[in-house]
Amino acid sequence: MTSATSRAYDHVKQAILDRAYPGGALLSEGEIASAVGVSRTPVREALLRLETEGLVRLYPKRGALVLPVSAQEISDVFETRELVETFAAGKATLGPDRIDELAGWLEAMRTHAAGGDAREFARADRCFHRTMVAAAGNEIITQLYDALRDRQLRMARLTADDPDRTATAIQDHAEILEAVRTGDRERIRAAVHRHLHTAVTALRGHA
């Protein structure tokens, strides 16, 4: 059975990632406890955990402030992604099975974009990139990339309502996949670099 703390944690974290609790919102323990159906103690424990993850800041007797995505955080995340993903592009083993997996995630992105499902679009987008990172075969780098997951998903929602950005993202991923199919590692790295540059520029306009 899921603990009360875990339930509260999952509820608040997902709401932050989905921007149901947007940056700058002040959350009260009582409101969260009522929404989840638990007492305040597990809510407090959940908020402490979220504070260590950099998603909220606690103010005694006032509540928890949802920290907005900052321009510095965007820069930090994308610098890290550039290092990891361009390295992976030069080392990854991208055979037919991996190519099929990437094609599947790209198709999922198209499907979710057409259906207006921003959450699943962002998840498919991230899984596309993780597939390439994992193909490099370095478990430590893959774990580092996984540590960025929540920040990536939260940032993706900043531009989720921009159809032009969604269309650009799909085109960028199609170009990465085409580069992968050629087996030209310099072309793959260049396609990944262009995509990340386009994405970070778009996000800075929404932060």
Image (cartoon, rainbow, N blue to C red):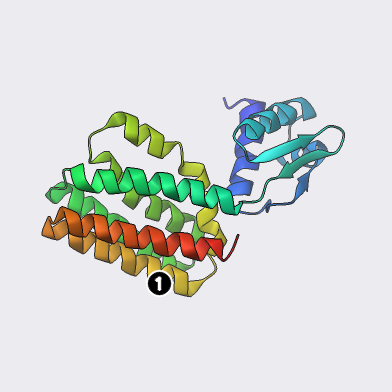
Left or right of 145? Residue 18 is: right
The residue that disc 1 covers is: 167
Left or right of 26? Residue 157 is: left
Please, is residue 107 above or below residue 11 in the view?
Answer: below
Front one among 43 and 199: 199
Residue 141 position within the rendered picture, expressed as x and y whole percent measured from the top left: 33, 34
Left or right of 141? Residue 15 is: right
Left or right of 2? Residue 101 is: left
Residue 173 position within the rendered picture, expressed as x and y whole percent measured from the top left: 31, 62
Quadrant of the image for the N terminus? Answer: top right
Q: Amino acid at mark 1?
A: Ala
Residue 201 position within the rendered picture, expressed as x and y whole percent measured from the top left: 48, 64
Q: Image point 60% across, 37% down: which residue?
A: 10
Residue 152 position within the rendered picture, expressed as x and y whole percent measured from the top left: 48, 49
Q: Image point 22% across, 56% down: which residue?
A: 188
Q: Quadrant of residue 65?
A: top right
Front one among 155 and 105: 155
Judge the density around disc 1: few (<14), some (14-19), many (≥20) Cα neighbours within 10 Å: few
Quadrant of the image for the C terminus? Answer: bottom right
